[in-house]
Amino acid sequence: LMVYAYDIGEEGELNNGSTTISFKINQVVSSLLLSLSDVEVSPDENFTIGTEVFDQSGKEIQGIVHVEVISSKEEKFELAIPSGDFDNLDFPSNATAGIWTIIAEFGEIIKDETFEMLKVQKVEFSFENNVLVVKNVGNCVYNTPINVQIGKENRNLDLKMDIGEIRKFYLKAPEGEYNVLRSEERRVGKECR
């Protein structure tokens, strides 16, 4: 800031002077923005969290935003996201269904958002000799029939399996080589049957 001062008399300008004054205005964090790629997410889907921090003049502040992600069962994990950047999260297929909370903190400013982890009925199949192994890898009770076809023969299996449960089914057929087909559907939503 430059200041110029003078006085005026009958004959014009009598005295004058100037000086320069410097001062610095410190940035003060005034807002923290937290952005989510969606308000509903399915396990096995990519989920993005973004952060931005601004000072009192609206200028972006650089720094690390500390983020805590909390499941509906209070399971927690932490992230450090640079201001103005994004981080991707990949949730496992058995991520706890329900409302999750994200808390972001930068200095004294705290911002929180929520999103819903949808319920997913999902099973994996494998074989151990003549035994069909079915494992519930979803995040809710699996309650869906499956159809197993061995050659020309069909067999319906009504499954009601808890999260992580493994069921084994002995499959028999006349001696020979067969193609074994199975049908099931992956269900995503707010309710599992």
Image (tube, rainbow, N blue to C red):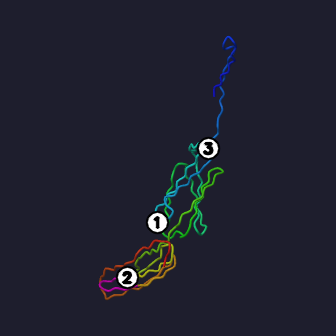
Inspect the magenta stretch and tell me whether residue 102 lies in it: no
| Mark 3 vs mark 2, CA separation in Å | 63 Å
Callout 1 amino acid: Asp
Sequence-earlier tag: 2 or 1? 1
Judged from the image, the secondary structure of the residue bearing numbered disc 1 is: loop
Q: Main secondary structure of the magenta part?
A: strand
* Tally of marks: 3
Disc number placed over residue 130 in the picture, else none: none
Identify the residue at horizontal 63%, vertical 54% (top origin): 110
Disc 1 target residue: 44
Callout 3 amino acid: Gln
Disc number placed over residue 147 in the picture, else none: 2
Disc number placed over residue 56 in the picture, else none: 3
Judged from the image, the secondary structure of the residue bearing numbered disc 2 is: strand
Sequence-earlier tag: 3 or 2? 3
Residue 14, image quadrant: top right
Q: Is residue 48 left or right of residue 148?
A: right
| Mark 2 vs mark 1, CA separation in Å | 25 Å
Callout 2 amino acid: Asn
- Packing grade of label 3 (10 A; few <14, some 14-19, many >=20) is few
Between 21 and 95, the one nearer to me in the picture: 21
- Dots 2, 1 in contact, CB < 8 A: no
Q: Position of residue 57 (x, y in %)?
A: 59, 42
Identify the residue at horizontal 57%, vertical 66% (top origin): 71
Query: Is label 1 or label 3 in front?
Result: 3
Identify the residue at horizontal 62%, vertical 47% (top origin): 30
In the picture, the quarter occupied by the N terminus is: top right
